[in-house]
Each structure stands twice: as C-alpha cells, then as structure tokens.
Amino acid sequence: MSKPTLRHSIRVVALRTGLSPHVIRVWEKRYGTVHPDRTGGNQRVYSESDVQRLTLLRQATEAGHPIRNVTHLPEDQLRALLNSTPRASAEPTRLRIPELAPARSAPDLIAAAHEAVFRLDGARLEQVLEEGAVSLGQGALLAQVVAPLVQRIGDDWQEGRLKVAHEHLASAVIRTFLANASRPMALHAAAPVILATTPAGQIHEIGAALAAAVAGNQGWRVVYLGASLPAEEIAAAAGHRDARVVALSIVHPADDPALPGELRRLRRLLPPGCRLVAGGRAVSGYREALGEAHATVCETLGEFSAALDLLRQSAN
Amino acid sequence: MSKPTLRHSIRVVALRTGLSPHVIRVWEKRYGTVHPDRTGGNQRVYSESDVQRLTLLRQATEAGHPIRNVTHLPEDQLRALLNSTPRASAEPTRLRIPELAPARSAPDLIAAAHEAVFRLDGARLEQVLEEGAVSLGQGALLAQVVAPLVQRIGDDWQEGRLKVAHEHLASAVIRTFLANASRPMALHAAAPVILATTPAGQIHEIGAALAAAVAGNQGWRVVYLGASLPAEEIAAAAGHRDARVVALSIVHPADDPALPGELRRLRRLLPPGCRLVAGGRAVSGYREALGEAHATVCETLGEFSAALDLLRQSAN
DNA sequence: ATGTATTGTTCATGTTTTGTCTATTAACGC
DNA sequence: GCGTTAATAGACAAAACATGAACAATACAT
C-alpha cells in the first residue's frame, strides 16, 4: 500500500492542523490517535490522511468533546459530529488560532469575492465571505457586501462579462452561506413565521435567500421556499405554517406581464392576517400591482430589516 | 477496530439534552435513571441511547410530569406521553436545544424526513439529517437516506402527492446540508478537481449536489456548478479549473431529444484528459449517447464512489 | 397555616483528564 | 561542526468531573 503519498514532518502537521507538536505527540502516546511512520532516525512522518484526521479531531475537541471520546472515531462520523453539534460551547475554548484576520473594508471584500467568482474558486469565495462576517459583522456583510456582489454578478451576467457557470457557482456558494448565516440564533418558541420565496416567473432565488438570512438573524422562524412559486402554492404554504409575513424577491424579469396578476391573486388567496413584503431590483416595475396587493415595498435591505422589526412589534 | 460507537462525556450530554450536569448526576443517584459506563478513572461515559432517553425525560418533566413518575418508563411510553399531552410549557424554553428525534435506522430517518417535508418544517428536516449523519455516518447517510429520500420526494411530486413548495423546501434544505457535508477539512494541494453539474435541460440539481458531497468526502476538490449548463460552459469551466472528472446528474426529463447531442458535443469540447462520469435515475434513457461520449455510467451512489476512487488512483 | 416530600441547585473537597512545560538526548540541514 | 528541530520521559497546572451534604423552592397533604 505505498505510496506516492505526501509526507510531512511534525512541524508542518502542527501548522496545518492548528495543534501544537506537543499535543500531537501526547495524543499519540496516550490514545494512539495516529500511527505515523518513522524515518531512519526515528522521526515522525505523517501522511495526508493523518493531517486530515488530526484537523477533524482538533475541531471536535474545540466543540467540547473530550479527546478520549473521539480519538478512535472514523472520519465520516467525526465530520457528522462536527456538523451536528451545537457550536454552543464557543466561549470557554482554551487556545485560539493566531489572529490573522486583516479587517477588510466592504469594497475590498466585494473585489476579492468577485475575483474568486471569476476564477470559479468556490472555496475562496466562501472564505472571503466568512472573513467578511468576522470583520464587518453579519448584518453589515449582508447589506454592504453580499447584496452589492449579487447585483454586480447579475449585471456582469446580463451583459456577457460572466458566463452562466460563474453565476451558478456564485449562487450555490452564496446560497449555502446565507442558509448557514440565517440559522444559528436561538429561537423563541413563539417566534413569528416568515416565508421567503419568489413569485412565479422570477427565477433568481438569491434575493429570497438574502431576505431569509436577514429575517433569521432578527429572530424570525424562516420557511425558505426557493424560486418561482405560483400564488396558490405560496398562499397554501403561508396558511399551512401560519406565516405572519410573506417576503417576495423580484429581481430579474422586470417586465413580466403575468406578474401583476400573480400578485393580485396572491393577495386574494393569502390568509387575512398575513402581511406581504416585496423587495429586489425590479420592484419599481410592478409598483402599481404591489400597491393593489397591499405589499410593503423595500428598496434596500436596510428598509427590509426595519420593516420586519415593525411588523414584529405590531403583532406582539 | 471493533466498533466505533459514539461515547459522550457528561458535558456533551448536558449540551445535547438541555439538562445540567448536576441534574443528570442527581437523577442517576436518586432514581437510577441511566447507568452510564465509567472510564478507568470513574468518569461517566454515556451512549447515544442514554442521550435520547434523557432528552425525552427532560421533555416529560417540562410537560409537567414529576421525574419520579417517568424515570423508569420505557422510551415508547415516554413518546406516547409526550404526544398525548399538549405542549403546556408557555415559557420561552430555557435552553435552546431542540427536541431529539426518535428515529435511528435508515427507514425511520427517511420517514421522519418525509414527514418534515410534508409539514414544510425545514428546521426539522435539517435536524433529522444531522442526527442521521451522527448515527449512520456521513457515507451511509447519503446512500441510504438522502438518495432514497430525494427519489421519493421526486416521485411524490410527479404524481401530485406533494406540491412544488414541498419540493422546493426540501431541495433548499438538502442542498445546504450536502454543501456543508462536502466541505473537505484539509485537502491536498494536489487534490484532483471534480466538476459537478447537470447538462442543459436537466433541471434537478440535487443529484449533482449529492455527487459533490460524495466527492468532497473522498478528498476531491469540488467545483459545484448547479443545474442545466450547456456543453460549452461545462467544457470551459473544466478547462479553466483543470478538472480531472466531470460528474453529470441526469434525473428528470428521461426523454429529452436534445440531450444526446449535448453529451456528444460535451465530449468533443472537453479537454482530452478529462473523464466523464454520469449517474442518476434517467441515465438508462441515454445509454447510447453516454457510451459514445465515453462516459462511465453509475447506477448507484456506491458505484459512483468506487469509480471516483479508481479514477483518483489511476492518475496519481 | 403548617409540615413534609420532591426536586433542582449550591458548596466543599478530592480525583481525573488534558494541555503545557522542562530537561536531556538524538537527529537533521547547512 | 553547529544551530535548529525532534523524541522521550516526567512534572505540572488548569479545567472538568465525582461525591456527599446542605439548601431553597415548589407542590402536596394534613
């Protein structure tokens, strides 16, 4: 079973895993965590999978699991554990990785993200977003980076500067990032429900995902339904989950002749107590129908956020 | 190398059940609620079923039942009790730990997940998936739960048992779950690149997301491009990122007359060293064209996984 | 109202776990 | 040859855990 495999010294392993050489050795001695080969001179030589395993173990211990309980778990169970465990115990973590976060400004972040999209580098895009969440904070990141970035990518796509592949990759990464960002807060048992989607014909779902993230951050219970839902479906879902608000993102076809009808129909079918909020770049094209549907129109994410706060208080 | 069973320290149990370590100990002492193993140094070690039982008991006590009356009830009676009593707890749950699910085997998990989709409860669906990842492991979860679940939802949707809203919600949650599952922790600088997408006309992206998750778990560098990309775009992206493999998911339109042409064109445009792998429920409908395109056809996720391992070794 | 049982929490003390540190010897790279 | 890095064993300190007893709050009964 050998081996064009890469081999690493303990120093490199320490750097890549975030553990100290001491810990790596003592884990091996006490628990037999990994069994690196040795050089002729008895020096440890680690494989790539050792590095991976140690990285997972570091994350598991940081998540609160005692090392003795996780050292012998297979990798996929470790991964699952990491995805499932509540990140709750983030406070009493003993040692932290050295601070490397260069607090970047919003325009810098947008530029870096755009560059990553252009290179089809999804991992890098994600990294930039996470970095931004740290330096700007979640709310500011959404309003000052993600929203403009999405708009810029949309423009580039419509004018042929970016291909469909770029747009799809960016959508997938941003969508996942937003889904993760909208989740983690503790939810009040009585948290109001908001439904985020896009009316039939509106094919761009990122706006709805953004709305979902903002609402989730403000403590709403979010039901995210993706893009292009007919009025009947939206209304039925709103009734089913007893939603207080339906948020619609309207971005791309700015002149869909069928949309005004959809909006009026939606208003008619929605439960009476359910408010309608619409945002997105193309809302101005449907102002009249939105007015008839008694929809609150938001031009920016900030407005949307404020509108949510108002709606929440009004019904408490 | 016997059994890598999950074992938890009392702190982790406290986090996952929402009880304090004190209460867990005092319940054991006073009522013999659970009988955890002990380490060599007399420290408690809990199993997954202990966690489940304690969670149920927490819920029972919160519902007003004195602990002495319920400690010795078997789990199914506890569940019945919880289902029969109305959720009396008006207070904003002291700890935000969600209810733990009863389901453990793959069929149970599928049923629970399906139920969550039907109720439009995305948070619950996500919870079921994460729980399954812990108890089954990532790989088994994908093959035994996620894949069948997706297929079942697809069937239900095509036959009108589920609405578009259900399908969209499920897609969004599963997609995010898969994206999180596919993130490799530490990857080789020289990790091979795989591109996951769907050829033009194939609108269901979940199959591609599944493939991406499997590949990510096996250490590939994944470029995920969503659904319905024309051959030129796929080829350009593969060249741009120097992909070794392009994975195509073919699920829904099983008789698209344009697809064979797309596949042949893709083969022509792809860089010579780049392999083509196709999977999904509808591959059998395009066998001929796939053969002409020199694509490896996988009927199941297991086959796909094996094919990836082969392709990886062959080029090292 | 008063007493009692139940139940969760707190305190005090000793033990275990776990990351870190020291000292010494050996190996590696220039 | 020499400075740097690694291996080993042992010591050490902070955090987490175990245990028993006491305490406060609530419910229930007299």
Image (cartoon, coloured by chain):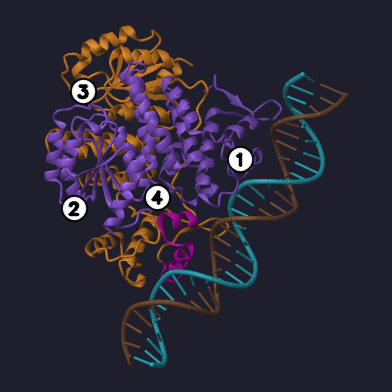
Chain colours: A purple, B orange, C cyan, D brown
Find residue A54 and report its image quarter. top right
Q: Distance between the residues labelled 4 and 1?
A: 37 Å
Q: Residues within 10 Å of mark 4 (few under 14, many from 20)?
A: few
Q: Is residue A218 visible?
A: yes
The CA distance from mark 2 to mark 1 is 62 Å
**Which circle, 1 or 3, is nearer the viewer?**
3
The residue identified by callout 3 is: B282
Q: Looking at the picture, tell me which residue is in the foreground, A252 or A237.
A: A252
Q: In the image, which residues are magenta?
A: B10-32
**Kind of residue indicated by mark 4:** Met
Q: Distance between the residues labelled 1 and 3?
A: 48 Å
Residue type beneath disc 1? Glu
Chain where mark 3 sits: B
Circle 4 or circle 2, nearest the eye: 2
Disc 3 to disc 4, how far (Cα)?
40 Å
Q: In this view, does B66 lie above or below A97?
A: below
Residue A232 visible in the current orientation = no
Instruction: State the SS at label 1.
Output: helix
* Residues tagged by mark 1 and mark 3 found on one chain of the structure: no
Badge 1 density bin: few <14, some 14–19, many ≥20, Cα 10 Å: some
Q: Mark 4 points at which residue?
A: A185
Front residue of B79/A221: it is A221
**Residue drawn at x 12%, y 40% as measured from the top left:** A265
Mark 4 or mark 1: which comes first in sequence? 1
Chain letter of mark 1 equals A
Chain under callout 2: A
Kind of residue at disc 3: Ala
Sequence order check, earlier mark of 4 and 2: 4
